[in-house]
Amino acid sequence: MNIIQTAIEGVVIIEPKVFGDGRGYFFESFSRKEFEEKVSGTAFVQDNESRSRYGVVRGLHFQKPPYEQAKLVRAVKGRVLDVAVDMRKDSPTRGQYLSVELSEENRRQLFIPRGFAHGYAVLSEEAIFLYKCDNYYAPGCEGAILWNDPQLGIDWRLPPEDVILSEKDRRNPPFAG
């Protein structure tokens, strides 16, 4: 796997080695040994999958301590714009975000350590999104940030009239700086 460092410490893009021939392709989407050597010693305990249509924005979600979650995310089908917002209290990049297009074509994955809010926007007709988490979901510790918070200024690459949100995500509070 090829590891691409980003402008936010701890957040990395992972590109797999893809082997293709006339039958199709094969790639190793996760190797615990290689991940621990090249990225992080994070141990994942849960896999989640979602299917969404064009315009859906999910997020920005996070888990509060002691149930924070690191995530390894990828688009199995379609294209998404994946966004991670640094919420770490002592981080020099607190309040900054990173966005990366993940797709079935580029097969990229994004590793997001604990201390980040996370969300994504579906850019294709449909997307199937998979993410590994290193901690279990705890409903009493969930938190969220308003997807279009002006302080963050995230470009979701969607016209505002095309954005589809859950009722819950419509009511998310702004980033608390």
Image (cartoon, rainbow, N blue to C red):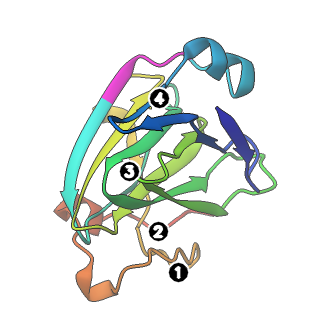
Q: Amino acid at mark 4?
A: Ser
Q: Amino acid at mark 3?
A: Glu
Q: Secondary structure at mark 1?
A: loop
Q: Secondary structure at mark 4?
A: loop
10 Å neighbourhood of mark 2: few (<14), some, or many (≥20)?
A: some
Residue toward you, 66 or 148: 148
Marks 2, 4: nearer the viewer: 4
Question: Which image quarter is the C terminus in?
Answer: bottom right
Q: Position of residue 162 (x, y in %)?
A: 25, 82
Q: Is residue 3 left or right of residue 149?
A: right
Residue at position x 47%, y 51% in the image: 118
Q: Is residue 108 visible?
A: yes
Relative to 12, is 102 above or below?
A: below
Residue toward you, 132 or 27: 27
Q: Earlier in the sequence, mark 3 or mark 1?
A: 3
| Residue span colored magenta | 43-47
Task: Report the residue marked by disc 2.
Answer: 174
What numbered label is drawn on residue 150? Answer: 1
Query: Does residue 107 show up magenta in the picture?
Result: no
Task: Report the residue marked by disc 3.
Answer: 104
Q: Earlier in the sequence, mark 3 or mark 4?
A: 4
Residue at position x 27%, y 69% in the image: 170
Question: Which image quarter is the N terminus in?
Answer: top right
Q: Amino acid at mark 1?
A: Pro
Q: Secondary structure at mark 2?
A: loop
Distance in Å between CA atoms under marks 2 and 1: 8 Å
Distance in Å between CA atoms under marks 1 and 4: 35 Å
Q: Secondary structure at mark 3?
A: loop
Q: Position of residue 51 (x, y in %)?
A: 20, 49
| Outermost residue toward the right in this view | 92
Residue toward you, 136 or 64: 136
Task: Report the residue marked by disc 4.
Answer: 29
